[in-house]
Structures are given as structure tokens and as C-alpha cells.
């Protein structure tokens, strides 16, 4: 809600009766902050305008750090997954509060794109009864292609739909090799009886 400096000053328990207690908190909210500027640094693959559109925050918005982190890292259509779907496995982004004046914050989104990673090997573990070629038909990550987070998610979903494996124990594990910008993808499976 924009109160980046909020802190709990005091807390105390109050007996209401023999079955209930109350918790009293003394909070100092501080001032409410708003976004003044958002600057993108280090981006070459995507324009600053397109990244700002994905971020969904603009000048004058209330500063919401948890929303910003979701839109940068964890939402399916966030900035980081966007890069990872285009092969940029070694991508990183560091949001920095560059300047804070009165109730305004300037944000710098410092990006390191790196080079796209190519899939080297696809390793399948845990299949004792199901033939490997049957499993490989369902996997969307193929050696020689660019790394894609969405392809891994789709592969897991399709392996689960086969019904041969325990869906909770289908674990994809990217094994990056930064030296030659490749990645091996290991799928650990647990067969059902």
C-alpha cells in the first residue's frame, strides 16, 4: 500500500477472557510512497516500453513492492519468465530504489540478459517399465533448441496426463553450463504401479 517505511513499534497480549486473548500492535506507518520514474538499464532484447507494459506499474502509482516482485519474477507472464521463454536462462534483474525524495521513488531495473542457452541433453530418470521413446514423445524440450520455461511446464503437464507417473513427483531439473551456454534438462519420474 505504499508504506515502505512502516514498522511495528510495540506489541502486547491482552487477556479478554479465559478462552480469548487480544493482540495490540502499535504501528508507525510513515509516509505513503508513489512511483516517480521507472528506468530500465541493460535491456537489448526488449524495449523499455514493452517491459514497462509487462510490469504494469507507471508514474504516479502507489509503490507496491510485493506487486512489483510478482510482475518481475513469479507471475507466468512476468518479465523474468518472458526472457526465460526466449532462451535467456542466465537472465537476472535487480530492482533498485535509485532515488527517494519526499513521497516519490525512482526505480532502476538493472538487467543482465546474458546469452541464450541451448538445450544440450534431455535426461530421463526413474522410468523402469515405460520405454524411454514413449516418454520422449511427450517432452517438448529438444536438444539443439533454445531453453524455454513454458516448454518445460508443458512437458511436465503432458507427462502427468499420460497416467504412467505420479504427477506430484515429476521434477524437471535444469542443469546449466555457463561455460558453453548450454543446459541439460533432467526429468525425474516416479512410475505408478
Image (cartoon, rainbow, N blue to C red):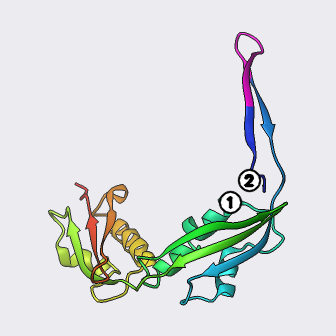
Cβ–Cβ under 8 Å for marks 1 and 2: yes
115 w.r.t. 90: above or below: below
Q: Which residues are magenta?
A: 10-22
Question: Is disc 1 placed on a helix, strand or loop?
Answer: helix
Q: Residue at x 72, y 19 (%)?
A: 21
Magenta-colored stretch includes residue 45:
no
106 w.r.t. 114: above or below: above
Quadrant including the N terminus:
bottom right
Q: Position of residue 61 (x, y in %)?
A: 81, 68
Residue that label 2 marks: 4
Q: Quadrant of residue 146?
A: bottom left
Quadrant including the C terminus:
bottom left
- Residue sitting nearer the eye, 165 or 182: 182
Residue that label 1 marks: 65
Q: Position of residue 57 (x, y in %)?
A: 74, 72
Q: Quadrant of residue 37?
A: bottom right
- Residue sitting nearer the eye, 191 or 19: 19
C-alpha separation, residue under disc 1 versus residue under disc 2: 8 Å
Is 184 left or right of 93, judged from the image as shown?
left
Is 44 left or right of 129, judged from the image as shown?
right
50 w.r.t. 102: above or below: below
Q: Position of residue 130 (x, y in %)?
A: 18, 68
- Residue sitting nearer the eye, 45 or 191: 45
Q: Residue at x 32, y 66 (%)?
A: 173
* Mark whose residue sits in front, 1 or 2: 2
- Residue sitting nearer the eye, 124 or 132: 124
Amino acid at each position: 500500500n505504499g508504506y515502505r517505511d512502516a514498522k511495528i513499534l510495540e506489541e502486547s497480549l491482552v487477556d479478554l477472557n479465559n478462552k480469548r486473548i487480544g493482540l495490540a500492535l502499535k504501528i508507525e506507518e510513515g509516509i505513503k510512497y508513489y512511483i516517480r520514474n521507472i528506468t530500465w538499464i541493460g535491456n537489448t532484447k526488449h524495449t523499455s516500453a514493452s517491459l514497462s507494459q509487462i510490469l504494469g506499474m507507471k508514474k504516479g502509482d502507489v509503490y507496491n513492492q510485493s506487486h512489483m516482485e510478482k510482475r518481475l519474477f513469479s507471475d507466468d507472464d512476468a518479465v523474468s519468465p518472458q526472457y526465460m521463454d526466449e532462451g535467456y536462462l542466465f537472465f537476472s534483474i535487480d530492482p533498485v530504489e535509485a532515488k527517494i525524495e519526499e513521497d516519490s521513488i525512482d526505480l532502476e531495473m538493472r538487467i543482465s540478459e546474458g546469452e541464450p542457452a541451448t538445450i544440450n541433453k534431455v535426461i530421463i530418470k526413474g522410468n523402469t517399465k515405460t520405454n524411454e521413446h514413449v516418454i520422449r514423445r511427450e517432452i517438448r524440450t529438444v536438444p539443439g533448441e533454445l531453453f524455454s520455461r513454458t516448454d518445460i511446464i508443458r512437458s511436465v503437464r503432458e507427462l502427468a496426463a499420460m497416467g504412467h507417473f505420479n504427477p506430484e513427483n515429476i521434477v524437471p531439473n535444469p542443469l546449466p553450463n555457463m561455460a558453453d551456454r548450454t543446459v541439460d534438462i533432467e526429468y525425474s519420474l516416479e512410475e505408478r504401479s
